[in-house]
Image (tube, grey):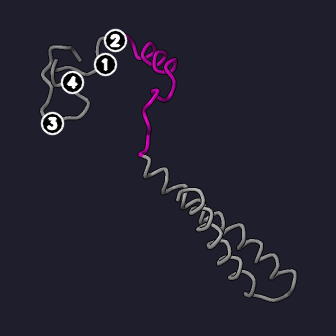
Amino acid sequence: MTGDAPAPAGRGGWDDDEERWPHEGEGSWTERYERARAKGPYKPGVRLYSEGTNLAWEVVSLLVGGMLAWGGIGYLVDRLTGLHHVFLPVGLVLGLAGGIYLAYLRFA
């Protein structure tokens, strides 16, 4: 594609000021790839997600992790004692309560 071709209106990826592809004329694909690879995957100071998203995922992982860990322990105790469906729900509830407590300690 040449630099003098008009840019279609409303298309993403076009440079509206100069009516050309944003990276046209900056070298071959191989050169651009090597430059991008040398820069690294992230720009300094730029976050991929907002603080709220990070916080939400941390809380969810604390809750799910607690339930999995203590639910697993409850399941094992059920299997060892021969009592079925007694300690698994207790472990799940304790894991959820522990996750809520850890989230409160960490973020409150």
Q: Which residue is mark 2?
A: 26
Which circle's residue, 3 or 2, is located before the other in the chain?
A: 3
According to the image, label 4 marks what residue? Answer: 15
What residue is drawn where x is 72% and y is 71%?
A: 70
In the visual, does 78 lie left or right of 89?
Answer: right
Q: Amino acid at mark 1?
A: His
**Is the C-beta separation of discs 1 and 2 under 8 Å?**
yes
- Residue at mark 4 to residue at mark 3: CA–CA distance: 11 Å
Q: Distance of mark 2 from mark 4, alpha carbons?
A: 14 Å
Residue at point 48%, 57% (across, down)? 56
Give the residue number, with chain letter if any, for mark 1. Answer: 23
Q: Amino acid at mark 2?
A: Glu
Q: Amino acid at mark 3?
A: Gly
Q: Quadrant of residue 84?
A: bottom right
> Percent position (x, y) of residue 20?
20, 20
In the picture provided, is 71 more to the left or to the right than 55? Answer: right
Image quadrant containing the N terminus: top left
Look at the image and say whether residue 49 sits in the magenta stretch: yes
Could you classify mark 3 by the number of other residues whose Cα lies within 10 Å: few (under 14), some (14-19), or many (20 or more)? few
Q: Mark 3 and 1 residues: CB-CB less than 8 Å, in contact?
A: no
Number of other residues with Cα within 10 Å of mark 1, as a class: few under 14, some 14 to 19, many 20 or more: few
Query: Is residue 76 magenta-colored?
Result: no
* Spatial CA span between label 1 and label 2: 6 Å
Report the residue marked by disc 3: 10
Disc 1 element: loop
Of pointers 4 and 1, the one earlier in the residue sequence: 4
Disc 3 and disc 1: Cα gap in Å?
Answer: 18 Å
Q: Is residue 89 above or below residue 33?
A: below
Boundaries of the magenta span: 27-50
Q: Is residue 79 above or below residue 103?
A: below
Separation of disc 3 and disc 2 at Cα? 24 Å
Q: Secondary structure at mark 3?
A: loop
